[in-house]
Amino acid sequence: MLKQTPTTRSRRRHRGTDSVTIQDVASEAGVAPITVSRALNTPESVSAKLRERIDQAVAKLGYVPNLVAGGLASAGMRMIPVVVPSLSILTFIEVIHGIQQTLEQAGYQVLLGSTDFDLDREASLIESLLGYSPSGVILTGLRHHERTSLRLKNWGRPVVEIMELGDECIDMNVGVDNHAAGACMAQHLLDRGFKRIAYLGTGMSRDYRAMQRFEGHRETLKTAGVEFDLLFRREEPSSYEAGRLLFLEALKTRPDLEALHFANDNLAAGALMEANRQGICVPEEIAIGGYLGLSLGEHLSPRLSTITVPRYEMGVEAAKLMLSRLEGQQPLAPRLDIGYELKVRGST
Amino acid sequence: MLKQTPTTRSRRRHRGTDSVTIQDVASEAGVAPITVSRALNTPESVSAKLRERIDQAVAKLGYVPNLVAGGLASAGMRMIPVVVPSLSILTFIEVIHGIQQTLEQAGYQVLLGSTDFDLDREASLIESLLGYSPSGVILTGLRHHERTSLRLKNWGRPVVEIMELGDECIDMNVGVDNHAAGACMAQHLLDRGFKRIAYLGTGMSRDYRAMQRFEGHRETLKTAGVEFDLLFRREEPSSYEAGRLLFLEALKTRPDLEALHFANDNLAAGALMEANRQGICVPEEIAIGGYLGLSLGEHLSPRLSTITVPRYEMGVEAAKLMLSRLEGQQPLAPRLDIGYELKVRGST
DNA sequence: AAGCGAAATGGTAGCGCTACCAAAAAAACG
DNA sequence: CGTTTTTTTGGTAGCGCTACCATTTCGCTT
């Protein structure tokens, strides 16, 4: 008489979801559950014969692994939270896009988190995201709460900080030197012969990266011996409208301005479109420079001079760095300067 | 003599992460683990005295619940996958933003998935996303593989289909009547006195919603007795550049066109900017209408006439519907028409 | 054919939490 | 006061999977 194992269904004493489990597949294929597990996760460690039988059973039963159970038993959940300040800023979206495409290919899923530029929210968000037992974390910027950094350092899994470049990162870092980028545009404007140059930005008390670009701008102008403290700022989020308002404010306050250095292309585009509307000639009456390299800039008249940042690529590289660490290799370098490029077009 | 329970640490025989567990909190507070669980999940079912002691222990030890274990033991993972065709299309981003903001507030996280408009990819993506045991799913459109729909129907958890409106949805539906929106813009152009009106779009073989708008446009023109089959299409994704190219192609092929009805504002903006560049007067020489209501449209000269769709709000409403179902209530209505609005501005 | 190391398979015991039910404590009742 | 009802707390047993280690099978050598 055969030893009677409880039938597959009667085994479920309580709260059983009826979904197909690894046990069901194992019974169907006549092997042990662990063998099914291996056939799916490390196929090379299972003989071809069994592997095929198991694959058939999987197909027949429509088995979908329960990643939650797997995640609990082993380490990771094959998820990577991506924490950004805002989802209404195109830049972050494009970076996320690059991350998502790259990670999804490798079988990881992206968990979305946004902090609204608030480090407290970031701290508690990350804390709760870690509860999902993700395989790694990608977050924006290098400035965090002390306890956030410490927690992630001790966490022992890969962390990539993006958008910004610096000496002290938690684990890995992909980004752009904002200070240098700001200096670069300022230098360009000086090279064009402009003397009275203003920097215009929004939400700079929260978005400190825009402030870093301003610092680069400021130092460059100072070195050149021209007026360097011309700063116009508003506190609302960036938008075409905010750019328009900054533009009007600057013109009214200082009609003698020769060039406007905007914190990003959204603002610059808003200003440029308003100039068009008012019949103000760019760059003859006033020059306009931006930052980011949004495609919109190439379609405006005149085309917008800007500093392009490969945002999608930054996401891809951040994801690649993450993946190389997840696959056990040491990444080639834990820090990657994704670079930027000055695009001189019609507006300067 | 007290019964000796194994000490907290020695209990971990193998592969123990050192993280604080519910057991640690329980020991610290001098209660059973299940009581800690209750204190955190259903505080009202625990006496005030114990609740406070437990809260203190939680704070002292820095306990963060392992949601994976919780998700395995009970049902949900407090995650909602959001599946969209593409992350490079602003529309979807704005909807996702609305969803994310609303769900995050309620303590749910958004898992991102993109299908590249491919129903096969959608099917396998959803299949693997279900492996995460999410609390619900939000996906784009009403057209899916038969097996995808069936699987989700049998899945037994809330599903919201967005962007589109129809009689047959899997579970719940929030969206816009694309057919009517297309007809609305076409009617507007007719009302303006235009007779030779073309529809211009990209990727319409994949993005069938753009095709639905075209159908509405087509029927309206047909009823009006004017030429109704003027269609220009390209297969690349939407972009300003694609709009520019469609514009040039249309003008070359049919110089007698009076109005251009673009499948979305990105295309329309690209065309409008090209018209500006070439000195073609809009709407005197040719009128341009869009769809979506991107803020860019309001800053162009002339301002872009369009049909606005409350994208962020659509996301919020989809998330609210999801939440109401998750919290056990029957939603007021399983179908919500989020509506649209014709914005007549300078370009028509 | 016996002996040996390597490769393939299986048994057991959790991962950390919560559903279910039972027990204890507190409150309400006659 | 004892008894019933209600509330609060705890014990046990998994959720479905995989790490660890033991066992079996296989190929190869001498």
Image (cartoon, coloured by chain):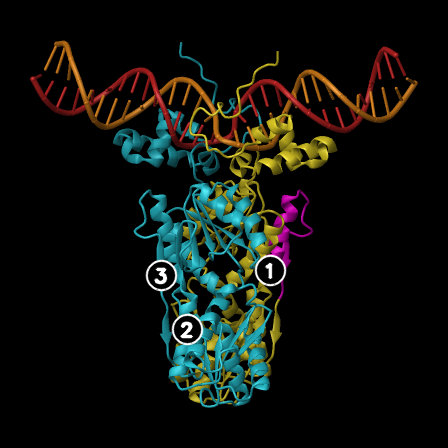
Chain colours: A cyan, B yellow, C orange, D red
Q: Which of the two residues, A200 or B225, is positioned nearer the viewer here?
A: A200
Residue B74: % across, % down: 57, 34
Res. B277 image quadrant: bottom left
Q: Judging from the image, what secondary structure is the residue with disc 1 in?
A: helix
> Between A58 and A132, which is closer to the camera in this rendering?
A132
Q: Residue at x 51, y 22 (%)?
A: A11
2 and 3 marks in contact (CB < 8 Å)? no
Q: Amino acid at mark 2?
A: Ala
Q: Residues within 10 Å of mark 1 (few under 14, many from 20)?
A: many
Residue highlighted by disc 3 = A337
Q: Secondary structure at mark 3?
A: strand
According to the image, label 2 marks what residue?
A183
What's drawn in magenta, residue-wise? B314-339
Amino acid type, callout 1: Met
Q: Do callouts 1 and 3 mark residues in contact (Cβ within 8 Å)?
A: no
Mark closer to the observer (2, 1): 2
| Quadrant (top left, top right, bottom left, bottom right) of the C terminus of chain B | bottom right
Residue B239: % across, % down: 43, 71
Q: How many marks?
A: 3
Is A339 situated above or below B28? below
Asked if marks 2 and 1 touch (Cβ < 8 Å), the reply is: no
Front disc: 2 or 3: 2
**Residue receiving disc 1:** B314
Disc ID at residue A152: none
Amino acid of disc 3: Asp
How many residues crowd mark 2 within 10 Å: few (<14), some (14–19), many (20+)?
many
How far apart marks 2 and 1 lie (CA) works out to 41 Å
Mark 1 vs mark 3: in front = 3
Is label 1 on the same chain as label 3?
A: no
Which chain does tag 3 point to?
Answer: A
Asked if one can make out residue A22 in the rendered structure from this viewpoint, the answer is: yes
Whole-angstrom CA distance, mark 2 to mark 3, is 16 Å
